[in-house]
Image (cartoon, helix red, strand yellow):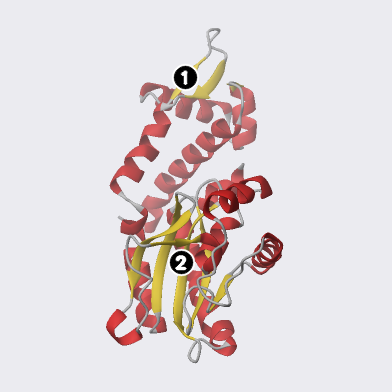
Amino acid sequence: MSEMNERPVNQSVAKLLQLVSVLAASRTPMRLQDVAREANMPQATCLRYLNALIQEGFAGQDRDRTRYFLTWGICSLGDRVRARQSLRVISGDILNELAAELGLGICLVVEHGMECMYLDCLYEPETMGYTLMRIGTRTPLHAVSSGKILLTEYSETALDRVIAEKGLPALTEKTITTKAALLEELQRVRQQGYALDNEECELGLRCVAVPLRDYSGKAVAAISAFGSVERVTDGLLREKLLPALRTAAAELSFRMGSGFASRE
């Protein structure tokens, strides 16, 4: 099929998705003319798409049949995607490419039970010598770079709850162990957009992490690169690690629907 033949189809899909986004952003059912205005399309075109959505069970009308809304049927699409494409599945190719490009250990981390849980880890324990980064392993949020990323989404009340239940144990002599120091560190992480672990989890290990954002715009996971303090220098961090991690994070966040957050 030629590019010229493909273009009308692509435009139609784009218009349909734009209409869905308009309806999703509204707290109440919308009149046809309002939907058409917000979606920037003729009312006749808008009505045709709305009828198609109604026919498929993804939209409906109020009792007076004058206003339109999305049904929860649209949620079933997201549920099916999440059920069949876990974060570890959709990130596998990117993490492997990142590990090959950087030649360092790579981790994918989420929060579970007020701790970091490693969903994936790519490195060779026998040659690198580090023992804590294993799939399924859990570590304290405050002591690792990925955990600091996840903590940036916590309110101070939620942070107090973590401290009350989990404490701020010292894994090394460099671990942050006070609330004041942790708050200062989290503010720095928010401002710079990445987090560091300078031998705070394991002596001799330096790690940098960046956030992965989902369709809500929140940092719900993190990817990190780690290696020896001798190898992970400030120069390497600035010139190679952060650009590579941010590129990978942008692609993964896109796969997690982060683009929708900007449309709210």
Asked whether 181 or 235 is in front, the reply is 181
Q: Secondary structure at mark 1?
A: strand
Which label sits on residue 60? 1
Q: Secondary structure at mark 2?
A: strand
**Count of labels in the image:** 2
Residue positioned 50% across, 71% down in the render = 171
**For the residues carrying marks 2 and 1, which lies nearer the camera in this image?**
2
Asked whether 111 or 250 is in front, the reply is 111
Residue positioned 33% across, 73% down in the render = 122
Q: Earlier in the sequence, mark 2 or mark 1?
A: 1
Asked whether 232 or 198 is in front, the reply is 198
Residue 5 screen position, x and y as percent: 37, 51
Which label sits on residue 223? 2
Residue 40 screen position, x and y as percent: 61, 37
Query: 160 above or below 73?
Result: below
Q: Is residue 118 left or right of residue 67?
A: left
Residue positioned 48% across, 90% down in the render = 231
Quarter in which the C terminus is drawn:
top right
